[in-house]
Image: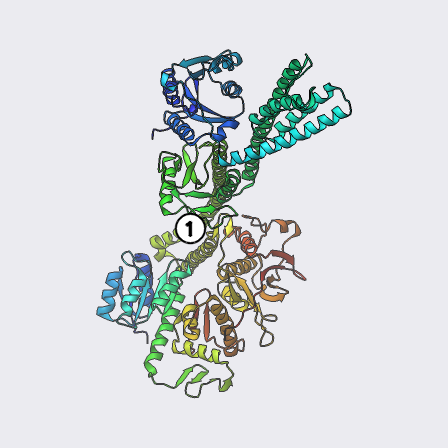
């Protein structure tokens, strides 16, 4: 298949339109139009006007129409389908709306068939669109006797019988009514409209023009036979009767035809309205759909509603065909979905970004028609329409294609949106990471300077130092290294933050063990650190268990205790304890230090806040600890709060969900 | 007692120096290896008493070294891991390691682990396989009678607690992972088993370590498992 160029791809000024039909000579028109498009470097559109009559097209005509359409497509045309009763009007409308500059027509549509047939298409089009070029292609003689033939299906014949019945009933009623009028000595001019009313009713209740015309003729005959003097003969005495008959016939035929035409219009506009409604609904549903799967589902369901056949969708996953989801009709749920063989066709459609399967040239034996969901040369999936048992009216019906196009648009914008969101989250995380790294590298420098400087001193002049100085230097190195170790522990907890969320590995843990483990890692400077066991282990059976990420919660307790050590003078008592409070476990770290001034309280949980406390060893305050603690506690669904201790000092407390363990004996 | 021979497997020279310096200062005999292959070779040719094994080796995975050594010997292996994730420690313990150290570790920690392991070795030597008693500090288990006493007082243990205690006692000094313990006791290792294990261990510990001054018999390794300590 030739790569399909679209109108938008070409920069030429001319826009050439050729009309598609089921005529054998149509191929010539398409070839010529394509050559002209190439010559003018213009774009080429092939238009098919669907009329009410084209629904009852014969199989061979339909076949030819499809062939012509495929040909046009291969020649690089954009296919457009419009619906309407009046072909000329539709073409003219399309020409105006689409900015067509050249119209290519065949001869057959330009010459009159009969003396009284309407003026040729080309002339009427010229009248309606005076400012475009119309090119007429000479038609070989062999085609001249071609006419689009209608076929009558058994259903139509059957409905023909019922139409005749309706006509008979109406005419009988009208004649009876006429006789009644005559009996009542109404004037004759009262009877004629009754027949015209009868013809109008026939047009409304029957299908096709035939019944209206036959009804009109029959009413004149019946009027003559039953209601004019001499009655029950086809003679008429009155010299004015021939004129009355003629006028009556003409009025009846025109009324009938108009009514019929109106009916067709109503049908067409109802169809158009239905399709617009489906398009509109699809638009609405697609804008509400969240995620690619939902978009494809909405598309499939709308297509199923529109076409009345099963629809399967294949999403695209990293450039490959995903798993098929088949939406069968509710009344035939057992209908098989496209199998492995058809999957190959879908795969081809995805990768070539061209339609394939039933009613196309590629894999025409497939029972599904596969349409790639393509926008801007990117395929987002494949939609397969079940063509078993149904025949799509126009193979690539414009509504079908626009729904698939809408679907592609929706998926594209969803992906763009998702990408943007991800980029925003990444940017936020990057920002957080950058802030952290800046703060950390700053805070790493201080102890590292001390460690490397002190070690350097020892290397160069360790022997000259007195024992006391040396011990002090050793101690400084050790303390700074210890501080770095605790910093690293916090960094590890931070590394668990991904996509702005803390990743937890939750498990039920005995609270007492967690407190004990945490306390092992806290080094007081002469502080009295201990666990308050009053609520932890009174009675034999009361064992507090909480659901937590043990590593992180231990880190929280270490940070809180370290914080208490840092901001209180040596010798201060620091208590760590826990108690049960309803469905939660409350863990607290309490000190009896100077406490935190009220004006500082709102800021203690801020990142990089180090307070103004003079007791604090400020050069070693990352200020990260409390902010991290709050993040960890919140990730557990709890809250970290600060309140004053009585008479002085502060209490940091946080909650964790309590856990009841089903013992496995 | 400090004459144990120790194989130090560590590819980072400063850390290796730190370890060997510490060992020398405490009169241990040591040999060193800086790759996994040479570690297996040294272990086979010198048959050390204890192996200190860094898990991040340049040639082969530390866990593979453990598996290879375990194919012929039960010599105690203490792994050293620089990663904070518990999974590689657990993998090493399940592969047969006895204990672990996480970098950064202090000299005291290193020495403490060595002492624990040496006591374990001494205990293994002292007890014959058919021994029907287990004595650890004040704790005494009479396997034959199925009774446990602490400081001469009989402890009332549930069957599960007794099974747990025996399992820990048989592996004194060794860190047992949650998975290992739950498999041994219940034959399975579901999340609920591990949660149950935590409760049983907590109650067992409370029975063993009743007073605030009572020695610690069972050590909790959060996220990893438990260990029975040898109490002097």
Residue that extends furthest to the right in the rendered view of this protein: A184
Quadrant of the rendering where the N terminus of chain A is positioned: top left
Q: Position of residue A127 (x, y in %)?
A: 52, 12
Q: Position of residue B149 (x, y in %)?
A: 48, 85
Residue that extends furthest to the bottom in the rendered view of this protein: B145
Q: Nearer the viewer, residue A628 or A462?
A: A628
**Which chain hosts label 1?**
A
The crowd level at tag 1 (other Cα within 10 Å; few <14, some 14-19, many 20+) is some
**Secondary structure beneath disc 1?**
helix
Query: For the image shown, how many numbered marks are present on the structure?
Result: 1
Question: Which colouring convention does the figure follow?
Answer: rainbow
Q: Position of residue A618 (x, y in %)?
A: 53, 51
Label 1, on which residue? A448
Q: Is residue A35 above or below residue B29?
A: above
Q: Nearer the viewer, residue B24 or B58?
A: B58
Residue that extends furthest to the left in the rendered view of this protein: B45
Q: Nearer the viewer, residue A435 or A96?
A: A96
Q: Is residue A114 above or below residue A358?
A: above
Residue A217 seen by the camera: yes
From the viewer's perspective, tell me whether residue A657 is left or right of residue B219: right
Q: Is residue A380 above or below residue B34?
A: above
Q: Quadrant location of residue A313?
A: top left
Q: Position of residue A325 (x, y in %)?
A: 45, 47
Q: Quadrant location of residue A482?
A: bottom left
Residue A13 seen by the camera: no
Q: Is residue A662 above or below residue B11?
A: below
């Amino acid at each position: 298949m030739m790569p399909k160029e679209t109108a938008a791809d070409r920069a030429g000024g001319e826009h050439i339109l050729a009309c598609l039909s089921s005529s054998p000579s149509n191929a010539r028109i398409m070839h010529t139009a394509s050559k002209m498009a190439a010559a003018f470097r213009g774009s080429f559109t092939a238009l098919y006007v669907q009329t009410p009559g084209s629904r009852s097209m014969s199989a061979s005509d339909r076949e030819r129409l499809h062939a012509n359409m495929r040909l046009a497509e291969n020649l690089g045309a954009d296919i457009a389908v419009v619906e309407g009763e009046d072909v000329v009007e539709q073409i003219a409308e399309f020409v105006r709306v689409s900015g067509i500059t050249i119209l290519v027509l065949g001869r057959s549509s330009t010459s009159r068939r009969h003396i009284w047939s309407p003026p040729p298409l080309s002339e009427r089009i010229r009248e309606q669109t005076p400012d475009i070029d119309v090119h007429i292609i000479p038609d070989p003689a062999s085609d001249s006797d071609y006419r689009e033939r209608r076929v009558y299906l058994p259903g139509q014949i059957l409905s023909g019988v019922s139409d005749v019945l309706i006509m008979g009933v109406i005419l009988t009623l009208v004649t009876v009514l006429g006789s009644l009028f005559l009996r009542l000595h109404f004037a004759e001019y009262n009877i004629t409209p009754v027949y015209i009313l009868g013809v109008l009713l026939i047009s409304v209740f029957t299908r096709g023009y035939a019944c209206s015309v036959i009804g009109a003729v029959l009413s004149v005959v019946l009027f003559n036979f039953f209601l004019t003097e001499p009655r029950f003969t086809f003679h008429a005495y009155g010299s004015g009767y021939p004129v009355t008959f003629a006028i009556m016939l003409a009025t009846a035929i025109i009324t009938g035809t108009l009514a019929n035409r109106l009916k067709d219009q109503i049908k067409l506009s109802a169809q158009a309205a239905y399709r617009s409604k489906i398009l509109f609904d699809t638009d609405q549903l697609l804008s509400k759909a969240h995620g690619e799967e939902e978009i494809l589902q909405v598309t499939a369901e709308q297509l199923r509603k529109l076409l009345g056949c099963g629809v399967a969708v294949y999403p695209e996953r990293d450039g490959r065909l995903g798993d098929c989801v088949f939406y069968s009709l509710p009344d035939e749920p057992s209908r098989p979905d496209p199998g492995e063989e058809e999957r190959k066709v879908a795969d081809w459609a995805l990768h070539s970004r061209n339609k394939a399967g039933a009613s196309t040239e590629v894999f025409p034996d497939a029972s599904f028609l596969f349409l790639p969901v393509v926008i801007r040369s990117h395929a987002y999936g494949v939609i397969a329409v079940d063509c078993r048992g149904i025949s799509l009216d126009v193979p690539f019906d414009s509504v079908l294609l626009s729904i698939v196009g809408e679907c592609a648009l929706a998926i594209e914008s969803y992906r763009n949106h998702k990408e943007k969101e991800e980029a925003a989250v990444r940017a936020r995380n990057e920002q957080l990471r950058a802030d952290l790294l800046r703060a950390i590298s700053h805070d790493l420098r201080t102890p590292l300077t001390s460690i490397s400087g002190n070690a350097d001193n020892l290397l160069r002049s360790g022997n000259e130092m007195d024992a006391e100085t040396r011990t002090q230097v050793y101690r400084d190195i050790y303390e700074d290294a210890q501080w770095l170790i605790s910093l690293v522990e916090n960094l590890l907890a931070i590394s668990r933050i991904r996509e702005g969320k803390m990743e937890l590995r939750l498990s039920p843990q005995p609270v007492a063990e967690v407190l004990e483990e945490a306390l092992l890692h806290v080094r007081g400077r002469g502080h009295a650190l201990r666990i308050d066991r009053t609520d932890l282990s009174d009675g034999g059976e009361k064992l507090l268990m909480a659901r937590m990420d043990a590593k992180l919660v231990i880190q929280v307790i270490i940070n809180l205790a370290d914080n208490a050590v840092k901001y209180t003078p040596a010798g201060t008592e620091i208590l760590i304890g826990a108690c049960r409070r309803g469905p939660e476990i409350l863990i607290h770290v309490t000190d009896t230090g100077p406490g935190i001034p009220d004006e500082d309280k709102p800021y203690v949980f801020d990142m990089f806040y180090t307070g103004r406390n003079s007791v604090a060893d400020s050069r070693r305050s990352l200020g990260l600890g409390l902010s991290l603690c709050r993040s960890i506690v919140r990730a557990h669904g709890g809250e970290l709060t600060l309140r004053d201790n009585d008479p002085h000092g502060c209490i940091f407390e946080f909650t964790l969900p309590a856990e009841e363990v089903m013992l496995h004996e | 007692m400090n004459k144990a021979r120790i194989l130090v497997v560590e590819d980072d020279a400063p850390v290796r120096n730190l370890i060997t310096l510490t060992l020398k200062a405490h009169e241990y005999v040591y040999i060193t290896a800086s790759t996994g292959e040479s570690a297996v070779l040294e272990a086979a040719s010198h048959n050390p008493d204890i192996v200190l094994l860094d898990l991040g080796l340049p040639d082969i995975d530390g866990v593979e070294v453990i598996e290879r050594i375990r194919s012929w010997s039960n010599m105690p292996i203490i792994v050293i891991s620089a990663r904070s994730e518990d999974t590689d420690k657990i993998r090493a313990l399940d592969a047969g390691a006895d204990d672990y150290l996480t970098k950064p570790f202090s000299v005291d920690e290193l020495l403490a682990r060595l002492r624990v392991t040496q006591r374990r070795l001494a205990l293994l030597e002292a007890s014959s396989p058919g021994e029907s008693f287990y004595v650890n500090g004040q704790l005494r288990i009479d396997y034959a009678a199925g009774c446990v006493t602490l400081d001469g007082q009989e402890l009332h243990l549930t069957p599960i607690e007794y099974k747990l205690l025996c399992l820990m006692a048989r592996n004194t000094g060794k860190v047992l992972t949650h998975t290992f313990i739950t498999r041994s006791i219940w034959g399975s290792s579901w999340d609920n088993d591990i949660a149950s294990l935590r409760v049983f261990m907590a109650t067992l510990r409370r029975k063993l370590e009743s007073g605030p001054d009572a020695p610690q018999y069972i050590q909790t390794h959060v996220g990893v498992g438990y260990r029975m300590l040898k109490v002097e």
